[in-house]
Image (spheres, rainbow, N blue to C red):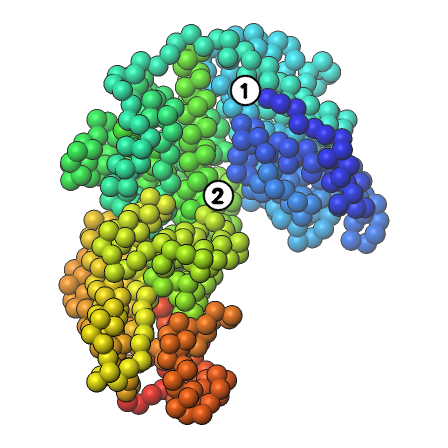
């Protein structure tokens, strides 16, 4: 592993941060980021760093303090706000304390905060406090875990690192681990660090650079040792699938898998807790899955219990999957899932003090399918990716242990349970609890227009994952780029789609499945308009509107219905209709007729899809002229004629339409989006309904 410390970069960071209290914080922050940027050292909130120094309290008095990374914060992009200050003198009584519950420990830590209101400090705080060194850094180096998590760990550690590290067996994080660590390094001035089996590495120094250097040096020595010890290659039973074939197979089965990994919620209005899937299928993974030793390597406990709250005890293994028969494969996964849950319940009941409330969701977080790859499931795309990273890194380390002649050593069931259901750890999950729509995937057609972009914006604000679709081109590209910059690329997918082309629709839905694993809601919004009296309306123009507004709705309804049926966890369809369905306008026949046909198709869909728990509803807006700077395509077509007929400019036309509704309200894309969200949130048991969003037009009231 390369040592990437740069005095120039460190100085630049100090310059950017400016004067700080404590003065050591910028260098601690720099070292923390360097460690976090190495995935083989720390992943997704794992690891922590600290410095013992002096700082000013809120009264301006100087006090001795321990500055430590807050619990669950990522080291990769850590900021000064991610570190908390604890009063060292007030921590002193803990040296002689025999035991504290997690709740009492958390409360005591809060009472020692130099800045009241700071975030909860790391669960490793006691370890950092009891070690006497100025800078302390704790990481989870994969290479070092490949030394400690094996039956011949003592020999491997001695051969790789000699006397440069102290070693202790795994101990529960908190008092037990902190005291054992402090005792192990007492008077061992020759040691560069401490190895805690099944946990990781602790290094220290008088400076941030010294502690960082020790981490890199020890990790590099372990990597070199393991590289030389490879002697036992995997026994590959048959040629692994190529990545392209694995992706194709995944896309074919993903909605079914997603449905099987979405646990029942216990809420009759939202029956399932939906998940986002992440597919991993590189060459190394596909080869491992085809190995004779695959199940032995994969179905074992995590490298470190820190990961348990994300990954569960082990992945779900599908033996000899029937990839040629989806129905048979579904049965295999259902059976394996049932065994997984039964085994989990038995494991919980075997513990001397099982949790009083067993969470309803004991579903697997990762599934290993030979020929397909690793599929991970999370409440959000970010969590699914996090679980994938942890799972792949874990498999890499376990494979290394096997190939270097070792046998993986599982952590004891008791230790696993203690960490998995520990209050302090599970608080990390509670702090990231997604919004009610956080696991939902929504496809919006016509996303580059005024109403479509407004709907996408509100859905993203509500926590949805959004596939924004429209005709491929600059308008869609700019829309997607804007949303990705605000809400994150992991939650926004741009999908070029021509709703009139069956192949394009199929491909677009396939893109959504590949990216998120499935779909929960379709917002059928794509549409075009044309102004002409019937006697002047050209048949080809009428057919063009019919293809987009009616056939486009039919094609997307069909695709969504098939996907929802295959997925098996219900869904929603919301058609963006129009007040013209109920109150058509002169010279607007092509639009009114084609949208009325689409509206009728949606009503029929509500009848046909209710048996698979799919709700189909409509929103009928009127006079939405723009969303921000984005002008409505419909009003770009209709507006000039309406302005000319009434002798109005653009502002005057908008005012005319505002005044003609009962509420004299300006109807916006946000209002339309609010109606969409009402349906998606299942506030009422409703399907086949239409919400007018028009300010009140008596002749357009659905009846």
Can residue 129 be seen? yes
Position of 544 relative to 532 (above/below): above
Circle 1 residue: 144
Q: Nearer the viewer, residue 388 or 526?
A: 526
Q: Nearer the viewer, residue 195 or 35?
A: 35
Q: Disc number at residue 22?
A: none
Q: Residue at x 46, y 22 (%)?
A: 397
Q: Residue at x 62, y 23 (%)?
A: 2
- Residue 214 in the image: state x and y as whole percent: 67, 21
Viewer-nearest of labels 1 and 2?
A: 1
Position of 477 relative to 226 (above/below): below
- Residue 137 in the image: state x and y as whole percent: 65, 30
Total numbered labels placed on residues in the image: 2
Quadrant of the rendered image containing residue 599 = bottom left
Q: Quadrant of the N terminus?
A: top right
Looking at the rendered structure, the secondary structure element under dot 2 is helix
Can residue 125 be seen? no
Asked if the residue under mark 2 is in contact with the one under mark 1, i.e. CB atoms within 8 Å, the reply is no
Q: Upstream in the sequence, badge 1 or badge 2? A: 1
Q: Residue at x 19, y 36 (%)?
A: 329
Q: Nearer the viewer, residue 508 or 90?
A: 508
Looking at the rendered structure, the secondary structure element under dot 1 is helix
Q: Disc number at residue 426?
A: 2
């Amino acid at each position: 592993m390369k040592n990437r410390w740069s005095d120039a970069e460190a100085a630049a960071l100090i310059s950017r941060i400016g004067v700080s209290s404590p003065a050591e914080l910028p260098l601690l922050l720099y070292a923390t980021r360097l460690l976090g940027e190495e995935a083989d050292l720390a992943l997704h909130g794992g690891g922590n760093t600290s410095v013992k120094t002096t700082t000013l309290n809120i009264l301006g008095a100087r006090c001795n303090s321990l500055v430590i990374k807050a619990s669950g914060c990522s080291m990769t992009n850590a900021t000064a706000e991610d570190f908390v200050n604890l009063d060292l003198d007030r921590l002193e009584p803990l040296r002689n304390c025999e035991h504290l519950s997690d709740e009492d420990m958390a409360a005591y830590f809060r009472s020692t905060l130099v800045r009241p209101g700071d975030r909860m400090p790391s669960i490793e705080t006691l370890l950092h406090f009891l070690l006497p060194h100025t800078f302390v850094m704790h990481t989870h180096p994969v290479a070092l875990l490949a030394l400690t998590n094996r039956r011949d760990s003592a020999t491997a550690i001695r051969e790789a690192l000699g006397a440069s590290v102290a070693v202790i067996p795994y101990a529960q994080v908190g008092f037990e681990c902190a005291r054992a660590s402090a005792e192990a390094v007492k008077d061992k001035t020759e040691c560069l660090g401490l190895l805690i089996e099944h946990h990781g590495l602790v290094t220290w120094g008088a400076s941030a650079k010294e502690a960082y250097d020790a981490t890199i040096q020890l990790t590099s020595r372990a990597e070199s040792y393991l590289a030389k010890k490879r002697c036992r290659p995997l026994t590959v039973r048959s040629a692994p699938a190529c990545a392209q074939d694995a992706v194709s197979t995944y896309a074919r089965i993903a909605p079914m898998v997603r449905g099987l990994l979405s646990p029942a919620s216990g809420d009759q209005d939202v029956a399932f807790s939906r998940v986002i899937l992440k597919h991993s299928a590189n060459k190394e993974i596909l080869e491992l899955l085809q190995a004779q030793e695959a199940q032995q390597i994969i179905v074992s406990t995590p490298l470190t219990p820190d990961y348990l709250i994300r990954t569960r005890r082990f992945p779900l293994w599908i033996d000899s999957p029937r990839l040629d028969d989806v129905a048979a494969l579904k049965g295999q996964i259902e059976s394996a899932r049932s065994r997984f849950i039964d085994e989990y319940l038995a494991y919980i009941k075997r513990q001397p003090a099982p949790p009083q409330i067993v969470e309803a969701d004991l579903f697997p977080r990762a599934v290993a399918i030979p020929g397909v790859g690793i599929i991970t499931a999370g409440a959000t795309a970010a969590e699914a990716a996090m679980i994938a990273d942890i799972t792949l890194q874990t498999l890499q380390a376990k494979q290394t242990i096997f190939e270097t002649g070792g046998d993986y050593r599982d952590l004891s069931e008791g230790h696993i349970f203690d960490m998995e259901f520990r209050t302090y750890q599970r608080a990390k999950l509670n702090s990231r609890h997604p919004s009610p729509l956080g696991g939902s995937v929504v496809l919006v057609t016509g996303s580059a227009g005024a109403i479509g972009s407004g709907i996408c914006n509100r859905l993203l604000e509500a926590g949805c994952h959004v596939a924004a679709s429209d005709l491929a081109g600059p308008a869609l590209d700019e829309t997607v780029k804007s949303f990705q910059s605000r809400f994150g690329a992991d939650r926004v997918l741009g999908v070029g789609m021509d709703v009139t082309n069956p192949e394009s629709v199929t491909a677009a839905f396939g893109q959504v499945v590949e990216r998120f694993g499935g779909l929960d809601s379709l917002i059928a919004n794509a549409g075009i308009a044309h102004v002409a009296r019937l006697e002047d309306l050209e048949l080809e123009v009428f057919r063009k509107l019919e293809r987009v507004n009616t056939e486009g709705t039919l094609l997307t309804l069909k695709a969504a219905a098939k996907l929802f049926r295959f997925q098996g966890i219900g869904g929603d369809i919301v058609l963006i209709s129009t007040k013209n369905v109920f109150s058509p306008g002169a010279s607007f026949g092509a639009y009114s007729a084609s949208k009325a046909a689409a509206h009728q198709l949606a009503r029929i869909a509500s009848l046909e899809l209710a048996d698979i728990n799919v709700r189909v509803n409509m929103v009928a807006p009127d006079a939405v002229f723009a969303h921000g700077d984005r002008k409505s395509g419909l009003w770009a077509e209709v507006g000039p004629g309406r302005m000319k007929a009434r002798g109005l400019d653009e502002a005057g036309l908008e005012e005319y339409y505002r005044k003609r509704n009962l509420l004299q309200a300006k109807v916006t894309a946000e209002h339309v989006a609010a109606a969409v969200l009402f349906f998606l949130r299942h506030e009422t048991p409703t399907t086949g309904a239409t919400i007018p969003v028009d300010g009140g037009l008596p002749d357009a009231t659905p009846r």
